[in-house]
Image: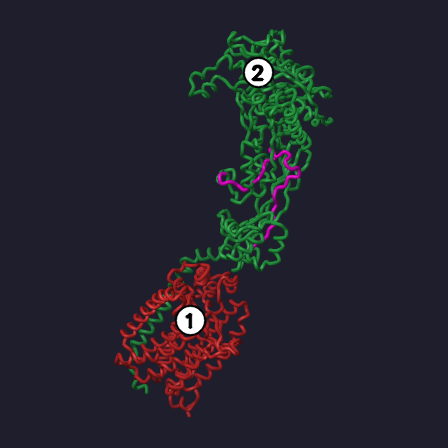
Chain colours: A green, B red
Amino acid sequence: MYNERPDIRNRVIALIVIFVVVLGALGIRLWSMQVINGKSYAKEAKANRLREATTIAPRGRIFDRNGKELVSNRSTMAVLAPATIVNDKELVKRLADVLSMTSAQVIEKASTQKESALELHQIAIDVPMKAVSYISEHSSEFEGVEVQARAVRTYPNGSVAAHILGYTGEISDTDLNSEDFKGYNPTDIVGKTGAERSFESVLQGVRGRRVMEVNASGSPQRVIEETPPEPGQDIYLTIDLGVQKVAEKAVRDAIKDANNKGYKANAGSAVAIDVTNGEVLAMASYPTYNPEDFINGISQETWKKFSSKKSNYPLTNRAISSTYPPASTFKSFTGLTALNYGLATPNTTFVCRGLWTGLGKQWGKWCWNHAGHGTENLRAAMMDSCDAYFYEVGYKAYKSKKESLQKMARSFGYGSQTGIDLPGEVSGRVPDKKWKAAWNEDYPEYKKWLPGDSVNMAIGQGDMLATPLQIAASYAGIAEDGTVYQPHVLKSVLDSEGKTVLKAKKKVAFESEASASSIHIIQNNLHDVVALGTASSAFRGFSIPVSGKTGTAQKTNQDDYAVFTAYAPSNNPKYAVAVVIEQGGSGGGVAGPAARQIFAKLFGKKVNHVTATDNSR
Amino acid sequence: MKKFQLTKYVNPSFLAIIGLLLLYGTIMVNSATSGSGLKRQLFGIAVGAVLLGFFWWFDYRKMKDWIVPLFILDALLMLSPRIPGLGYNAKGATSWLALGGKIRLFQPSEPAKLVTIILLASIMVAYKGKIGSLKDYLKILGLSFIPVILILTQPDLGTGLVFIAIALGMLIMAGAKARWIIATVVIGLSLGIGMVWIDGIADTKVGHDVLLKDYQKNRLLVFVDQNLDPTGAGYNLKQSKIAIGSGQTTGKGLGAGTQGNLNFLPERHTDFIFSVVGEELGFAGAMALLALYLALLMVSLNIAVSSVDLFGTLLVTGVMSMWVFQILENIGMTIGLMPITGIPLPFMSYGSSFMVTNMACVGVLLSVWSHRAFQSTAKGM
């Protein structure tokens, strides 16, 4: 009985110690987890239950000047999955089978670091309806997998205006890190080239955001937070779809004409601008491509093709990114130099004997007409495109030591970008003393500017280079008595209600050096070139008076490049056009008829494909 | 006849603490199961209350001489799931009695805990509170290990550890020398670690599990490296820690635990009920529970000390040892202090077998308390 009870005091103390140690250890651990480190656990709990999905804003549409759709969006289906899908090999296999992909491809898409850990990863886009409905009907077998509607670009006119519109694609790392693309997601689709690129900030829109609560198996339970996407703004371009189509066809026709005449022509471009404000109505470049090819990411194969020499670089917008010798079209500016700086008057005559020997007999240079043009004043020299006359002017300019040719050329925009609102514009080249010295830095014997350099430049050859757009813009400048408006393709920006929020304003890009009286003389001469001179064959019977100039540029080891540029109507100019056909043979014979088609469309006349002959250069 | 005095039979603070714990547990199970577990929990408490009443009324001292029948009962309870058609296998252990092997009745290892406590008390009381020789100590230790070996046949390692904890606690009170007990713990731990190690080698040599099952080994590995395999073997631990930690100081609010409600927490109404407490009620709620447990243990200790005989003291010590080990193991595993096993939390976890056993234990304690001062009157009961 209990009187035999031993002294248990120490045993009781031992048990108390055990109780306190056990509960104390638990308490301390809980203190550290809940009070000290609670915040980081709270973050983990949040990461467990929250999935963030961004809803992509539809990109703004692109219209032509008359509201015809050039680029629009079409709805397609994308399949998305959480990054954790890679842990479930069987699910990956199932999904891969449905999407006609390999498991490895699914895993690669699911494990890109582009999306954040909370986001769903895009596994496939443009998924066929059959696969979409299979996944929806068997959703229990595809836990966490989501099907979402996506808007992708669509081009109702196919490849028409491809170079102006440009294409879109997933943002590059370089862009992502640049200041212009601050706040973009690594999966954003952005404009890569053309107007898509130039007006990216307007077209893009703002992504919507949806935070969902999911359970342990990844099924969404409820929406925690939602911000709807703001669609991108629509834009109107200055392009006229009808004119654009004709311009593209005209270039193709010209290439065919040239081929029929035995020239190797395989590329070309045409530009049409409004001389009164710089609006670009058409800009064609051949060969071309279909922007549709870029929608789901360009395939390796297509990309290789596009960047091979054999394909002749269809992605290049030749109208602004390629440079050519302006050839005889430059004679207008040589003429202006002569008149403006007193090197010649309209009545000054020169006798062309075929071979020009101004630099001495041993340095004789041929006029394209070896028989000679006889006695010619400026008007006749322009109409016949007489080289000898302009050699003489060039030599006089050289002797004056004032680089007046260069000054005149630059005042019409040669040698610098016009500032058109499209990416990839190059500045061409106006050669001068300083340029030559720098260019031939390693060849001291070629550093000196020689009389021959000025003489070659006077006929738009030598080292003189210009883009088709520059050529058109400079003639727009002649048409406008010396004012060159900045060429642009953006007409207006519309908000989501269709209200115009921004209108492109005309802007003077260049003011010429030439006096109004000298320009008027050249204007008259250019009218006569088309009416009676080298371009008369191309414009025979055309009801609108056109003023322009043919040109035929020589390139080593290639057929001559055909150039023609003009503005119309002569008395009250509205549009300027430039056409360059690589290896097209003859400006008047090949490029002129192309320009005629474009003018016809611009003025609402019947578009005729005429054949013309012209032997000048 | 002396006048019946209710206050002599009732230990108000003890009953208050039990009441609060049951209330706390019911609220948490209700929250963790969104109400669906409430009925069964209350059923467990109701059945438990009947047993509590019975053991309270019953004079515990009568059980002192039932060594042989208790041994037989213990063995029957623990081996019964092995009888074909009676057992039910859940999570690798055949620990349920079931009708036709399908309809689960109860886990016999739960009542076996109380039977074992009574059995060990009966054995130890014979030494009159002083285990003087090592031979006696080893003899008692050996007898205490019979229930442990029996339970390992199921095999339920976690419950086996509970039996060891009960035996060790009671040995302290029975008068074993401190150094023997410490030596026993040290040797036991070393043997355990050694066995796990040898088992690993044996498994690779033989090509299949020898002693420990794969999931048991994984639980130990995860315990050692808590960041291991967070989507597989380490999932439960990781999610439980996130739940408790994210409860922070005051919790996310009752019923507002995201880890629980969105199914990140496994077994949240049974073994991981404490994770729900930690998540929904935070450090404050967890501390309140620990405080209740500390009070429970202290009041129980007072009952042990107040007992009229050593047998009563030993019984109460056995029950306390069971509770304290289960509290340590259950809460410890949810916060990464102990490896994960399937040990429920006293008065909190959902599960009627466990609840009924604990209520019966409370009845035994109340019986000890009731008989403390008036043996003569108590005898007449």
| Location of residue B7 by image quarter | bottom left
Q: Position of residue B323 (x, y in %)?
A: 40, 74
Q: Is residue A158 magenta?
A: yes
Residue type at the position of mark 1? Leu
> Any mark on residue A279, and which?
none
Residue at (63% x, 29% y) in the render: A280
B350 above or below A320?
below
Q: Position of residue A129 (x, y in %)?
A: 63, 51
The residue tagged 1 is B292
Farthest residue, direction bottom: B1
B340 above or below A486?
below
* A511 to the left or right of A612: left
B106 above or below B239?
below
Choose between A450 and B249: the one closer to the eye.
Answer: A450
Q: Which residues are magenta?
A: A145-174
Residue at (30% x, 84% y) in the render: B128
